[in-house]
Amino acid sequence: QKDYKLWLQFDRITDTRLASEYRSRLQGIVSFGNSETSKIATKELETGIFNMLENKPDVLSEIKGENKIIIGSRAVLNSEIQKSISSDFDKINEEGFIIKTILFKNKKHILITGKKEVGVLYGVYNFLRLLQTNKSIQDLNIADSPKTNIRILNHWDNLDRTVERGYAGFSLWNWQKLPDFIDQRYIDYARANASVGINGTVLTNVNANALILTPQYLEKVEALANVFRPYGIKVYLTARFSAPIEIGGLKTADPKDADVSNWWKNKAAEIYKRIPDFGGFLVKANSEGQPGPQNYGRDHVDGANMLADAVVPFGGVIMWRAFVYSEHDANDRAKQAYAEFQPYDGKFRDNVIVQVKNGAIDFQPREPFHPLFGAMPRTPLMMEFQITQEYLGFSTHLVYLPKLYQEILESDTYQKGKGTTVAKVIDGSLTKTKLTGIAGVSNIGNDLNWTGHPFAQANWYGFGRLAWNPNLDSETIADEWLRCTFSNQENFIKPVKEMMIQSREAVVNYMTPYGLHHIMDTGHHYGPGPWVSNLSRPEWNPVYYHKADKNGIGFDRSKKGTNATAQYAPEIEKIFDNLETCPEKDLLWFHHVSWDYKLKNGQTLWNGMALKYQEGVNQVKDMQNIWNKTEKYVDADRFREVQMLLEIQYKEAKWWRDACLLYFQQFSGKELPKGVEKPIETLEYFQSLKFPFAPGN
Ligand code: BDP
């Protein structure tokens, strides 16, 4: 099954000239080292080369002749090679790798090495990618290292195997059969992650169940940790703050209570006894009804630091989430995380990292960067992206997310003047923090193709690549992914890459153009629901976010409104605050403007908005046209699958356009401009639609 193999297809190289050049340079593998990791690296190289070049390289234990690939970590390399490249090791960090053409006894070879075994494994996957993407391997001199320490997937997986906001089937983790049954998928999952440099996984949902911390489950977690370890992947768990009560028999979970902190210390010791390299805990506390320190009159610092003290003797970390908003201060949800967390800057223990979503609301098709990224210079902050497409058409719509990730990472916080981008906050280069990280809420389930949509695999891949290096370009990543996953044919790559790149803007256009946000239907978050106004908490209702009325539309977060703009550095605040300078893509996020407001292109807002909705639909049509021409480059299954999915996406883009425009038209009272197709259905029809059973909510 092709789509099970993800980007690790290792298809035969069809360019015969290139294949023979590769063959001549890859005449055997000399593998130093005996660890599990090094065995995996050797095997990957062997089978990868065999599949791509159809010749089985010999695996040798010493260097003879020429044109061998020599692999091994620094410690196990022979002393002559070690000496000759010792200065290269200065260029990499603990997880980095070197791929270099070297001379050994006057003969050319390719060396793949690193300070640690896992670096060698990363080097091997990167080397294989060179072949997969048909790059020259003539004179190699690559030294590369991950720019962040924690590159981690967050699985929102429940113990009953349902996945919160998961659209690719049930959870991979078969808790019932663990620890004795090791599904091959666990190994393939680890492989895929290691191949892009992901080095951690949180196995359980942030809306946590304390049972995972009982011995019965820890035994199962241990079995998974054992599978992942040789691939350089650490296991983490979510910690339910009230666990001391629920499974510990205590009366309280107050972080200042000595019995409580002792309970966590003992729990940590118990976990580390089983899993010596356990990563630590991810915690959602006092957010959306989850228990936390505030239940006891304590604060986030008390809670996080208490847990941090429990894991610190073992080298563990606490990832404490900043996704909080309260119903008691409903004036502007976008301001609440900042208001609650910013005053804690500098107060957390060294092994606490605060995990912040990319935007201040919640994983919308477009949000400006979260103001906290520019506001906590004395606190390690990690990024939380969503790979699963909760608000972007589940695994039905083709949306290439690295484009969104890049937009956020490139945003300038001005924390220390111009050029202090979010990427620099995240990779620690700004604040010199040693604890850095990027988390991605996983889109993986037990579907045969892992992610539901074949192109959703690109979001997993791209997340990993950007976690490795937040400065990578999303277009380059798309190029790599396409070549590794489908084909190297330029006639395929060029248009399909374009399709991927434009897919992010398309979804913004047909769902939430010009800074609109959170106007999806209740509960499942799939289709349009700008009319929803009956939910118990004001900030759960779409009408709270678009504020459409006869006078106009948009959420005024400027000085005249909720003053959320003041949470940004003065330079950015000024830009967002002023209608003249506020980027139009964020217009209705920051301003309430009249339907006649003149856009930069000369259109009125109403016309411009309607045209954007139409443009989104047209873009999906373009995507269909592009895909329909790829049949000869793609296997029949994936071709057909993507074709059907794009057809649904096209239908649903029209659904979003028509439902939103009909609804907003009640307020604007204006005709649809020329160029926008007339809706066939009525607003009442769209409002009456009931979404069928939605997975994962
Ligand atoms: C929202 C989801 C909800 C999650 C929550 C979170 O709708 O299912 O539990 O975020 O991140 O996006 O905690």
Image (cartoon, grey):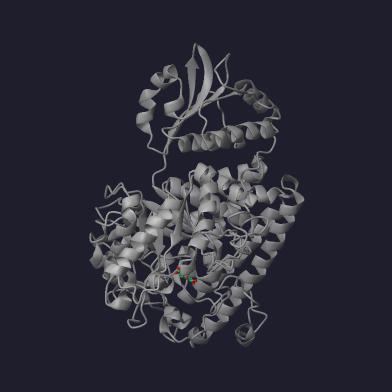
Residue 319's image quarter?
bottom left
With 434 as the anchor, is 410 left or right in this view? right
Q: Position of residue 679 (x, y in %)?
A: 64, 79
Q: Position of residue 226 (x, y in %)?
A: 52, 48
With 349 as the anchor, is 290 left or right in this view? right
**Depicted 275 relative to depicted 517: above or below:** above
Residue in the image at 67% along x and 62% along y: 646
Could you tell me if residue 254 is visible in this image? yes
Q: How many marks?
A: 0
- Residues 373 and 87: in front is 87
Say which quadrant the C terminus sits in: bottom right
Q: Residue furthest top?
A: 106
With 601 as the anchor, is 633 left or right in this view? right
Q: Position of residue 624 (x, y in %)?
A: 68, 59
Residue 372's image quarter?
bottom left
**Depicted 399 relative to depicted 226: above or below:** below
Could you tell me if residue 575 is visible in this image? no
Residue in the image at 47% along x and 35% along y: 117
Q: Position of residue 383 (x, y in %)?
A: 40, 57
Residue in the image at 71% along x and 58% along y: 641
**Depicted 383 relative to depicted 552: above or below:** above
- Residues 427 and 561: in front is 427
